[in-house]
Amino acid sequence: MAELHAPEGANKKKTVVGRGASSKGRACGRGHDGQNSRSGGGVRPGFEGGQMPLYRRVARRGFSNYPFKKEYEIVSLSSLNEAFEEDSIITNQVLRDTGLIKGTNSKAKILSDDSTPLRFTLEGIKVSASAAEKIKAAGGEIK
């Protein structure tokens, strides 16, 4: 038991402040005069010494659409060809179950690539114009 000890540098002595010349005496590490040297001194967050603070100078107007922004995960036609068979009905939930899109509320957008698609039925999924052309040419359907 006597051999147990904390590693080197784990325990440091607390700095004693304001107890004479041997410690951090006199101004106690706070500098000499001024607002920050006093007890309870300092200024609130955002205070700029009496200058009109930034949060009051900058106008807060208008409307932000950020909370209502819709983000789509991109899925290529070739990845649909690999994951599904001919005449499959594909929805966002089916894409989520197969792992092509992640997240509970995420939505997919199908983009075109070099591949020729199989015949699919897409329901409730955004499709680019070129991908829609290819899917319809292959006999697929977009609802």
Image (cartoon, rainbow, N blue to C red):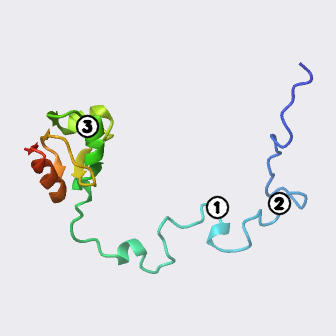
Q: Nearer the viewer, residue 101 or 66?
A: 101
On residue 39, the disc is 1
Quarter of the view holding residue 8: top right
Can you see residue 141?
yes
User: Which one is in front in this view, the residue at disc 3 or the one at disc 2?
Assistant: 3
Residue 125 appears left or right of 54: left
Asked which secondary structure carries label 2, the reply is loop
Q: CA distance from mark 3 to mark 2?
A: 66 Å
- Mark closer to the chain start, 3 or 2: 2
Residue named by callout 3: 95
User: Which one is in front in this view, the residue at disc 2 or the one at disc 1?
Assistant: 2
Residue named by callout 2: 24
Kind of residue at badge 1: Ser
* Residue 105: image location, x then y, percent: 25, 41
Quarter of the view holding residue 87: top left
Kind of residue at badge 3: Leu
Q: Residue at x 28, y 71 (%)?
A: 60
* Residue 90: image location, x then y, percent: 18, 37
- Mark closer to the chain start, 2 or 1: 2
Residue 23 appears left or right of 57: right
Asked which secondary structure carries label 3, the reply is helix
Q: Is residue 130 above or below residue 101?
A: below
- Dot 1 alpha-carbon crowd within 10 angstroms: few under 14, some 14 to 19, many 20 or more: few
Q: Residue at x 30, y 75 (%)?
A: 59
